[in-house]
Amino acid sequence: MTPYEFTCPDCRREIPVTDPMREATLANGCPVCGRAVAEDNFATGSRC
């Protein structure tokens, strides 16, 4: 699995996520504040 670093565009919370978590976050929004997110809110492990 590819590790990602998710950064919410609204609450700015940074969360490490796996592929399944990334897909769930894209579908359901930020797990902290609920804001809709996009692909560009995820960085691959190389940027972390």
Image (cartoon, grey):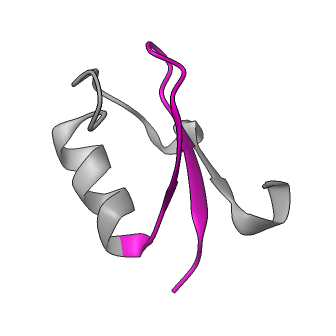
Q: Position of residue 8 (x, y in %)?
A: 48, 27
Q: Position of residue 1 (x, y in %)?
A: 51, 86
The total number of labels drawn is 0
Quarter holding the C terminus? bottom right
Residue 16 located within the stretch drawn in magenta:
yes
Q: Is residue 48 left or right of residue 1?
A: right
As drawn, 21 above or below 26: below
As drawn, 33 above or below 2: above
Residue drawn at x 25%, y 34% as measured from the top left: 29
The image quarter containing residue 16 is bottom right
Q: Position of residue 22 (x, y in %)?
A: 38, 59
Q: Position of residue 12 (x, y in %)?
A: 54, 20
Q: Report the residue that reaches farthest toward the left.
A: 28
Residue drawn at x 44%, y 13% as measured from the top left: 10
Residue 39 located within the stretch drawn in magenta:
no
Residue nearest the observer in this picture, 17 or 22? 17
Residue drawn at x 31%, y 72% as measured from the top left: 20
As drawn, 45 above or below 1: above
Residue nearest the observer in this picture, 15 or 35? 15
Q: Is residue 34 left or right of residue 16?
A: left
Residue nearest the observer in this picture, 23 or 7? 7
As drawn, 34 above or below 22: above
Residue drawn at x 73%, y 66% as measured from the top left: 45
Q: Report the residue that reaches farthest toward the top.
A: 10
Start-end of magenta stretch: 1-19
Q: Report the residue that reaches farthest toward the bottom.
A: 1
